[in-house]
Image (cartoon, rainbow, N blue to C red):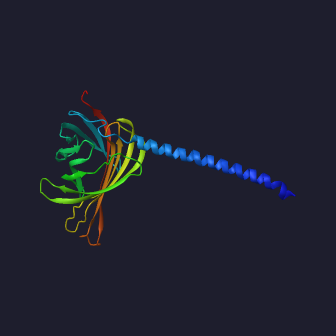
Amino acid sequence: MDATINAPLLSVAQHTQRRLTARRFGFRTIALLAAAAMVTASAPALGEAAPAAGDTYVYRLSNGFNNEARGQISYRVEKIDAGRIVVAVSANTLPAEMAHTEIYTSDGNSVRRPLINHDRPVEYEFAPVYPAYEFPLEAGKSWSLRVNATNPATGRRNSVRVDANVLGAERIRVPAGEFDTIKIRRIVYAGDWDGFRRETNIMEIDWYAPALGRAVRTETKSEYLDLSRTRCCVRIAGDWNIYELVSVSTRDR
């Protein structure tokens, strides 16, 4: 008799549990879709926050291993011509040779910029452009491209591979304030083979702020294998550099 009495109650309980489970699943699905929509919505439209000649962005450079401040680096937009943005880069307390010119497309990819080769920056011109970003920037998106990098001083050409993926949205604080950002990680194979020194592997992480159309924080690390050492292969670690936006000075629009 107990089994007969309890059967309908069990059926009702199971039905109620299924409804609750379905509701929880529905709420969870809605939450996940909303979160994904937020990340997608954060992706910038091309042309947003377009720079103008005279705009200046100042970054603090720190040593990631010990948080020691190494100085400030200034990026000043010199001119914009045929979709190319020419930027003068200078530093206040760093070696004078770090002053140079960089060239970008309107969506922030590099035509000309330094790339770490065996723990030192070397200027390159890229064709096609260095694929730092591939819009729209959506969480989970990835790309892998190989480009030619030519050293204008020596004429040497390297084949550089960039593997990138969008990690998602993140709100961060830097000296210039708080920003909603999209976090992007790139693994770069520099193609700079040199005798017993294998190519440099570089990790770049950007916190890209759509409101500014640029990264407000960047971290870079590099390493390579030296085969000339007595113990076959010695891994040589390069600098861990952290760049954080300090100030923005824009020409009156």
Whether residue 122 is visible here, answered yes or no, is no
Query: From the image, which quarter does the N terminus lie in?
Result: bottom right
Tell me which corner region of the image, top left, top right, bottom left or bottom right, holds residue 228. Answer: bottom left
Residue 252 image point, x, y percent: 25, 27
Q: Residue at x 50, y 45 (%)?
A: 33
Q: Residue at x 41, y 48 (%)?
A: 139
Residue 212 image point, x, y percent: 32, 37
Q: Residue at x 23, y 61 (%)?
A: 191
Whether residue 19 is visible here, answered yes or no, is yes
Q: Number of marks in the image?
A: 0
Q: Nearer the viewer, residue 116 or 105?
A: 105
Residue farthest toward the right in the current orientation of the protein: 1
171 displayed left or right of 71: right
Query: From the image, which quarter does the C terminus lie in?
Result: top left
164 displayed left or right of 112: right
Residue 98 image point, x, y percent: 19, 46
Residue farthest toward the top in the current orientation of the protein: 252
Residue 195 image point, x, y percent: 19, 68
Above or below 227: residue 68: above
Q: Residue at x 85, y 57 (%)?
A: 2
